[in-house]
Image (cartoon, rainbow, N blue to C red):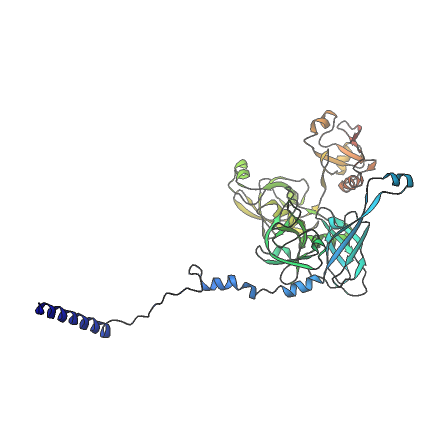
Amino acid sequence: MKKILTLVLVSALGGIFTLGTYKLFLEEDKPILVAAESANASFLPTSNMNTLFKAENTIDFTIAAENTVNAVVHVKNVTLSSGQYSLQDLFSGRSSERAQMGTGSGVIINADGYIITNNHVIKNAHELSVTLNNNKTYVAELIGTDEKTDIALLKIEANEDLPFVTFADSDNAKIGEWVLAVGNPFNLTSTVTAGIISAKSRDLSGTSRQSFIQTDAAVNPGNSGGALVNTNGELVGINTAITSQTGSYVGYSFAVPSNIARKVIEDIMEYGNVQNGILGIQGGALNSIMAKKIGISDTEGVYIDSVVEDSGAEKAGVKKGDIIKEIDNIKVSKFSDLTGHLSAKRPNDIVNLKVSRDGDIKNIPVKLAKNNTFTMPLVGRIKNAKPSELKKYNVTYGVMITELNSKYADYWKKNGIHEGCIITSINDLKVKNINDVQEALKNKSNYEALRLELINKNGDLERYNFR
């Protein structure tokens, strides 16, 4: 038994001696690893974490906010509304008109006191006043408006140069870029909220006529007409709309891009109205359904279904079936990309189109023309008539019907009215061009009948009344 224990002990001491010798003389040194909680998540590189979570250290909103709040004003609009007559009003002969106050925001755009705001902020104004950030109040003059873009221009007379905001190029604004919304929501003056540009070329109408900048900066009633600025304090857009079931901010809002707003007010100041340059094409944005329908594989761009006669597009060689991929190096993936860029252009401006034609890419410069077509209620599409077209019907003025309203086409045709006939008068006003047509319709009250004089296909004068 003692011999066995002695053998075990000798074996153990031999093993210890051998292991010690290996550890001391043969095994390489290795660093000791200690398990610890990492300050950075293992699935994100440290450099990215610093970029994501230390961004607030590199972005300073304070200077942009301070400069902008002094150039954003509080707009007050007094309108007169016709209320119901009381018995006392009837006996005393007093008017039932009541004054109502509406408020919004505006942006000073030069030291002379020109202010840009929304058309809906000042619509039907009886009195307009503007209060600056220093609490000084001025009577405001309405210089002009454009209902289509919802932009209006005001002017105040001050005895000093006023702080103002400079315009940025909204085409260069990028999705994800920080922006500030400055205005007077709920009569809370000089309010600044921050967010990012969520999307560009947004159309809320469903007709591809709008091209808003979408942002998640909080915008509420009263912000309308206020500034959307970048971190340099430059004007990127005019806050205009929110989409909400409650009427208040729900996560996103919309602004008229600064390039469009700037062009509109420059036109108002120089011409008294907005000068719209048109490309001269009709079509729609591509998607899988549309591409399959017309037998192509392309799903991005604007497909040209037809080219307007005598338009800049026709003269430049644009053809039916072309797909617009870019305009002035700006990618076109939907129709509002195209219309948004064109809204900042005037007649005789030249735009450069990149189009796909049968798989080949072509660059086509197009000179924009004045808009000589208009879609008229009840009738359909009309255009300015050429002298040769007027001579055919032995008339010296009028506008030509180019496409009948599909809903009333059968009625018109039964009465001898078709494409090519001439409208000479609307509500007893002679119409020589589409501007006259638009003016006649604008001046017609909602309770007034629409009276038309037309030359039918036989050259006879016809009169129609619509209610």
- Which residue sits furthest bottom? 25
Name above or below for residue 240 compared with residue 391: below
- Residue depicted at 16% across the width and 72% down the height: 13
Relative to the observer, which residue lies in front, 18 or 137?
18
Residue 31 appears left or right of 177: left
Name above or below for residue 28 compared with residue 92: below
Q: Using the rendered image of the protein, determine whether residue 167 is visible from the camera's viewpoint.
A: no
Name above or below for residue 10 compared with residue 250: below
Q: Quadrant of residue 305?
A: top right
Return the x and y of residue 272 as percentages of the image width and height.
78, 51
Q: Quadrant of residue 416?
A: top right
Return the x and y of residue 439 as percentages of the image width and height.
79, 42
Return the x and y of residue 432 as percentages of the image width and height.
79, 39
Q: Which quarter of the rendered picture does the C terminus lie within?
A: top right
Q: Using the rendered image of the protein, determine whether residue 130 is visible from the camera's viewpoint.
A: yes
Relative to the observer, which residue lies in front, 65 or 301?
65
Residue 93 appears left or right of 307: right
Q: Quadrant of residue 82?
A: top right
- Which residue sits furthest top? 414
Q: Which quarter of the rendered picture does the N terminus lie within?
A: bottom left
- Residue depicted at 71% across the width and 44% down the height: 371
